[in-house]
Image (tube, rainbow, N blue to C red):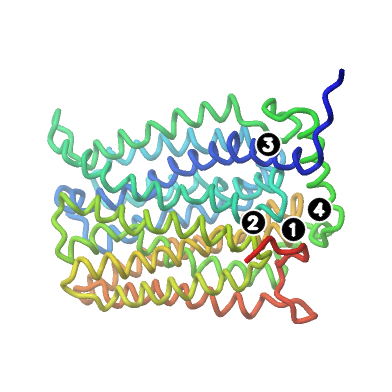
Amino acid sequence: MSMPRPGADEVAASALRKVRTHLVGFLALLYFAAFIDRVNVGFAASQMHRDLGFSASVYGFGAGVFFLGYCLFEVPSNLILHRVGARRWIGRIMISWALLAGALALVRSAPAFYALRFLLGIAEAGFFPGMIYYLTYWVPSTERARLVGTFMTAIPISTAVAGPLSSLILGLDGMLGIAGWQWLFLTETLPSLLLGFLTLRHLPDTPAQARWLNATERDWLTGRLQAESAVHPGGALTVAGALSSPRLLGLCVCYFGADLALYGVVLWIPQIFSQAGIAAAWVGPAVALPYGVAALAMILWSRRSDRRRERLRHLVVAALVGFAGLAASAFVHGSAVLAILALSVGVSGTLATLPVFWTLPAALLRGAAAAGGIALINAVGNLGGFAGPYALGWIRDATGSYTWGLMVTAAGLLLTAVVALAVGHDAAGEFWGNSSAPRRGA
């Protein structure tokens, strides 16, 4: 007797579950390794200052110059990914950045620090927007915020893990004649190198290549995504049209504000906590607290956005919460507890904006236009990743305090909220990016 064929809902649930467990989890692991390689310089900063004499301005510029190299090559990198496939291009990105990240252990001067950070940005260009673009091959729009949120929890989790882990590695200072900050760069680059080779071997470019989907699941997923593309107005945009779209340029400004806050804080938070009176041995665990809270906030907020089929209001509310928390942290002086609480609110709001935000370009664009448009948003946005750390360092040197630097990062989130409201309405006055599908509860 033949087995009954599964219903459409069962096939959909099975396909999405496998995408989440086999693909999104692996991509999150890749991003986890990438983000540790980005932020470990924040934990190395105090020992680099001791050994190399770097001022706050030198460190801030070196931390931020990564994003200049990243921005210059973002769009061409993503267009290459569109042509050659995610497996080869993301694997190449990871291997090249791992080698350069390890080379930071050889730095002896400010120019060498700047050069290697700039080259590291070039090597990693296209990684994150490539991931976002690649997920449009696999995740229907109605599920995108939740699964992108799952993927992007790599940001707070990697920072939370990097804190205690970096503190332990820095404790190797002097072993075998190698400084703790050198051990940090050498050891934390190894996972990226290994994962790069695993990507080259195992990452499927499309659902048709995924051996962990059965034929029925592949057909359902491919058909669902093709149906979305067929009715999608963004599919008709050329790359040039996408890159000159006023709405897309507005999204670039939104992301600039979010990244100004994200990287302004994440690359300085160990030193902010040190100034708040937290002992060096406890800075790493203290950093883990706000980012652990932020991971939960990202998951819950992105799921709520999917459940309600609403994007813009969720983006604006999260940005305003982040603004309030970072602004409050700027005026907390002498209390480690209040500093941790305020930054927990600020970091949670900042990170909760991201998965909701990244549903919007995917709702506007398809194909090569999506590859170029997503890369442009990330490229312009990541100029905020340069501006935030550099502004904090420059203001810290000028004033002796992080107060006004933190206010600059908070202002980035206010900019995100204001511009999102300005560009987020269609001709009928409706919020763009929302789904017309019925809501699944409150």
Label 4: which residue? 228
Left of 185 or right of it: where is 14? right
Q: Quadrant of the C terminus?
A: bottom right
Quadrant containing the N terminus is: top right
Q: Which residue is mark 3?
A: 85
Q: Residue at x 72, y 50 (%)?
A: 140
Q: Quadrant of residue 313?
A: bottom right
Residue position marked by numbered label 2 in the rendering: 374
- Check disc 1: other Cα within 10 Å, few if <14, some if 14-19, many if 20+: many
Residue occupied by mark 1:
365
Helix, strand or loop at label 1? It is loop
Tell which circle, 1 or 4, labels the residue nearer the N-terminal end.
4
Of the numbered discs 3 and 2, the one sitting upstream in the chain is 3
Q: Amino acid at mark 3?
A: Gly
Q: How many marks?
A: 4
Where residue 277 appears, x then y in whole percent? 14, 64
| Mark in front: 1 vs 4 | 4
Closer to us: mark 2 or mark 4? Answer: 4
Q: Amino acid at mark 2?
A: Ile
- Marks 3 and 2 in Cβ contact (< 8 Å): no
